[in-house]
Image (tube, rainbow, N blue to C red):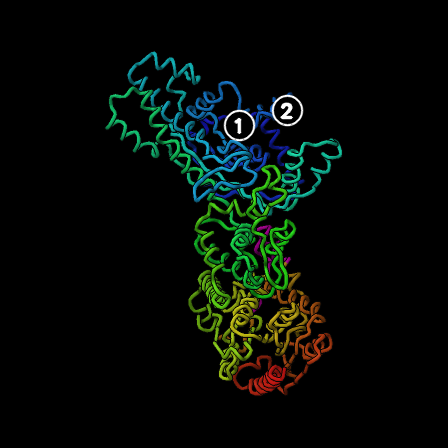
Amino acid sequence: MQEEETLAKANRSFRFAGLIVSAIKKLSRSAVSVEGEEKLRANPTLFVVNHFTRFETGLLLHILYKHNGQMAHSLADNGLFKGKFGQYLESVGAHPLNMPGRDEKMISELMKGSHNWVIFPEGSMIKNKKVMHDGQLQLHLESKVIAPHTGASVLALKTFLMKEQYKRAIADNNEQLINYYQDTYDLRGPGDLSPLDLCIVPVNITYYPLRPGKNLLSTGVQLWVKDLEPKLEEELLVEGKILLQESDISISFGHPIDVRSFSKPYRRLFAYLLPFLPASKKMDWMMKLMRHRLTHKFMHRVYSRLSINMDHIVATALRYVPVQGLSETNFKQIVYLACLQIKKHNHRRVHRSIQDGIINLVADGVYPAYDSIMQLAIDEGVAFVKGGMVLVDHDNIQAPQPFHRMRLDNTTSVLANEFEVMKWAVKIIKKLVKLSPEKLSLQVADAVIERDRSIYENERMRSYIKGESKNREVGKPQFLRGHTNKPGIVLIHGFLASPGELSQLAEHMNQKGYGVYIVRLAGHGTHATELKEVSLSGWVESVQRGYAVLSHYHQKVVLAGFSAGALLALLQGASQLQKLSAIIIINPALFLQQKSSKLSPMLNRWNQLLKGLSVEAGSLPYLENEAQYPDTNYDKIYVSGLARLIELQEACSEKLVQITAPLLVIQAEGDPVVEPGSAQEIIDKVSSKQKSLEYLQLQQHVIVRDEGSVDTFYFIDKFLDKLMRTHNDN
């Protein structure tokens, strides 16, 4: 390969430094993720990178080394190159900005393809991340606002044009020019040139979460050095925290810019209109014309490659909160909808902080990623939550801070600044903030329904097998609108089943005017193989989506579940939901008749061990199941799914005492699947003041459909009628 022929291999010092970096990574709690490695080419490459921390130079050099085993060179601050440490930096590929012959060395190595180069075109760390002004790229530095430096684009253009002129001089046998280029750029002949053209690769480095503060590194240095310079202290508090806390460092390589292709229209234009210009003059004029356009092109790509996270969305939303404030409920709705709409655009990779569990924002749940950035804003005096209202100190969030204090004193603004370049995403947030509370609620409900159905369809397509997968109408989640003055009822089916299991009960409730949402638990209603990868959190989120829909249409919500679904109703009901009116559970699967089910976690671990060893013999992935209703239930029980059921039983048992809502328990005395004693255990442990247990003289487990459902429906109607009378009296 060409890269093996031209790129220099890493020297011993560089490899030793790599070992040090690896050791630091093991001690650090940070995780480095890389996106876009497939965009890296064998061509000589100029990497242009945003600059926020000092350790980025070494980090990126070693990421590149890990990718292709070759060294790259970079530029670093002059002040670091002192004594032995300076010599060491040079040995691992870093060079000072004021290095004699710097540009000639860089052009030479890029022409030859012996080394790639990493450059931070901003010229210094942009600690405030403020790179936009009046919609244009403008760098807000310590004492001035300037357009992005064009040095990197001049370097790239010079490298390409000089290489072309050198080849032209050889073709023309122009000895004077040949000698000039060979002397200036350390060339011995055309064989030294890389056969591949130069390209520019934009790189973005994003940090999450950004929470400056005391850390082991800053404390250790302060013990040794009593009078730290404020600038150094700030860097230790910010960058030490990134390295030593649980931070995600996301590195994203953008689409390469081919310098030949970029410059082609300009070269043609000059060749056609100004053929009489001397070559040197023509090159100067072309570079003056191209450098700003090229700089804008790659800088925009650098900034727009950031990994979008919860900090960006919340910090930006706070900037547009009106003076009178917003209710915290509405603010969370805005953040939730912004997360969904930004992900739907699919313009950029989104961080896991806006992927996993964001339904909690609109389902009365706890979402740590949201709570963390809100607490930061409150601590910095940017935002306040008072009487259920989110209020913002706009003077504080917009006020310029001292450049070397910005990352410490107003991190919230730094995060919002970083996101400004994502104009399309900022526009989404601004539009959402202007919506009325009523429109926000309806949009949230519609978005959750769409999201729930999308998750189902994706899961169904992933595992679809003709003749085995469940019918779409049976498996999909269902929403039946009702009267908003009545409670909405969330129905949760059992283990191995699907929403179709509860369709008769749903229709019965809906005919009485109740709004109903039949939840589809993750891994259900499609194909049994989906149970191999299910998680308890996935089931909980399925229930949360149902609650979120109905809580945005109804003032009161009832959670009703059958079998395993009953446990999920209890688990969700223990979280003190604001609109929770009551809980109804039917044949709750707290204890199973089949004691061997307790072995499922052990069997699951055994299967995982064999899988890790690539051994298939001896594994027991599933058991056959004779379903009472095969139209809605799976005919296989995957051991990993059964292990999640045991996990659900344990989680539910721990939370029973926290349940205070009115509770109805219905239990078939002859249930062959669930121990009837489960019902009494639940009644004894919950803290509900209003609770009742109804036993039915039935010898079956499924009592929510067909002939076994009459008495079940009767007791549910009776319970809800009494609940409605109580609400009306209050």
User: Which of the pair 30/528 is nearer the observer?
Assistant: 30
Residue 102 appears in the rendering: yes
The secondary element bearing badge 2 is classed as: helix
Q: Does the magenta segment cover residue 606? A: yes
Span highlighted in magenta in the image: 605-624
Spot occupied by residue 352 in the image (x, y as percentages of width and height):
55, 52
Check contact, mark 2 vs mark 1: CB within 8 A: no
Q: Residues within 10 Å of mark 1 (few under 14, many from 20)?
A: many
Sequence-first disc among 2 and 1: 1
**Magenta-span inclusion, residue 59:** no
For badge 2, the amino acid type reads Phe
Front-most of residues 613 and 148: 148
Answer yes or no: is residue 527 visible: no
Q: Position of residue 654 (x, y in %)?
A: 71, 67
Tell me: residue 525, above or below residue 677.
above
**Quadrant where the N terminus is found in the figure:** top left
Q: Which residue is mark 1?
A: 75
Task: Locate residue 271: give its quadrant.
Answer: top left
Foreground residue among 395 and 125: 395
Residue 85 is labelled as 2
Q: Is residue 596 left or right of residue 516?
A: right
Q: For the residue marked with disc 1, what is the amino acid?
A: Leu
- In the rendered structure, the answer to whether residue 586 lies left or right of residue 145 reads right
Spatial CA span between label 2 and label 1: 15 Å
